[in-house]
Image: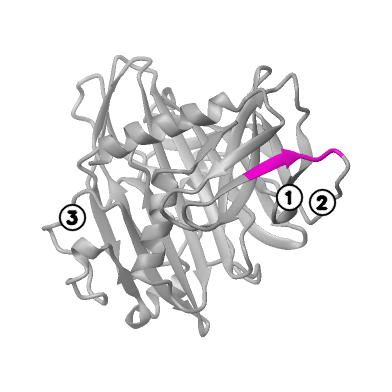
Amino acid sequence: MKNLIAILFVLLSVSALKASNTESWVVESPVRDLFYEPVFAEVSAQNFDEGVLCLSSKYGVQPAQVERLDDQKARIWWLATQTAGETVRYEYDRNANCTQASFTWQHIGPQSDRLSLGDRPVLQYEFPVFDYEDIELTKKPFHHVYSPNGTRLITKGAGGLFPHHRGIYLGYYAYIDGSDQRVDIWHARNGERSEHNRVIRQIEGPVVGGHVLSIDWKDLEGENFVDEVREVRTFLQPDGNLLIDIRSELTALRDKVLLGGDRHHAGLQFRAAQEVADNQEATRFIRPDAWSDMADDEELGNENILDFPWNAIFFEIEGKTYTVAYLSHPSNPDGAEMSERLYGRFGEFFKQELTRGESLVMNYRFWVKQGEAPTRYEIQERFENYATPPAIIK
């Protein structure tokens, strides 16, 4: 089923490409409503400078944002809100004014950058310089997530229960060139690690903020064995909500790299703040229909853990409640195993073997909602819009 949806996703992406040389685009809603849904048209970078432009539709004027991917290609991002089955044309309006608050990056520490929308913090990227004398605090880059109102972090950094769990993070047990020696990028206790290399580019504007990162995966001798390009994008959403897309591309630099581990110690995962571990009684899980008979205040066992399209965790911090929905794109490999922990960690894991030059691409979306928990139906609708985005046509 995942593969079938992935094929449909590719076909819809082709529809987006057909719009590349126009100055107006039509969004065709599928059978679902769209609400602040990120959409894009791919265009020639030679025709559009990076920055803000205005789009007019029957609903008025709204900002759009040009993101240059390279010297040849760019994307125009905007947010579509329309009812199921509705077709809306968005036209580039050179005379309109659509100025509003923008996502911007600020360097707030020696190895810490913060993304804010206006003056409201949204994400924080931690990228410590590795130090053999201080492995624990310098062994991995990760992204902190702020509450949707920007008042506090809702993810855990170093320290606390299981100190290697930090924000939104990625790790595996790796085995290189057939060796049975574990290169543990998950715990990273002995000098093996993922390490920030550089910021390839930053994304700033009123619709989407984020960055593209180069991250090195290093073995026990400090030699690179995987090259990672991690893309993080956060989209404008209504008050009380965050929407974060993460794309990670892992490319093998050795003849054979096995990315292994297990569902509790590998994959892209989310870890809530330490206060959640201290108040586990308030934690609940919201699962898709096929898993709805399981108790929401209990963790998954060892059965019926495969191929969750999405999962969500509801937790409380200092009297305020939050839900984080974890949406796994259907293009991700089949056979993924879901992990849940009431102390605030969850995410999926799958094994993958790569040969030299071969890449694994993973795509995930996080929907963060403050206050009352969303319904199972609302999360499913968010997933379906992510999995099969609306067609963009001329």
Q: Nearer the viewer, mark 1 or mark 2?
A: 2
Q: In the figure, residue 270 lies in which quadrant?
A: bottom left
Badge 1: few (under 14), some or many (20 or more) residues near its Cα, within 10 Å? many
Kind of residue at disc 1: Pro
Q: CA distance from mark 1 to mark 2?
A: 9 Å
Of label 1 and label 2, which has the lower sequence position? 2
Which span is picked out in magenta? 89-94
Q: Is residue 384 above or below residue 345?
A: above
Kind of residue at disc 2: Cys
Is residue 285 found inside the magenta-colored segment of the image?
no
Which residue is pictured at 78% across the width and 37% down the height?
51
What residue sits right under mark 3 in the picture?
305
Of label 2 and label 3, which has the lower sequence position? 2
Look at the numbered discs 1 and 2 and tell me whether their residues touch, using CB distance below 8 Å: yes
Q: Which mark is residue 206?
A: 1
- x, y (%) of residue 103? 72, 51
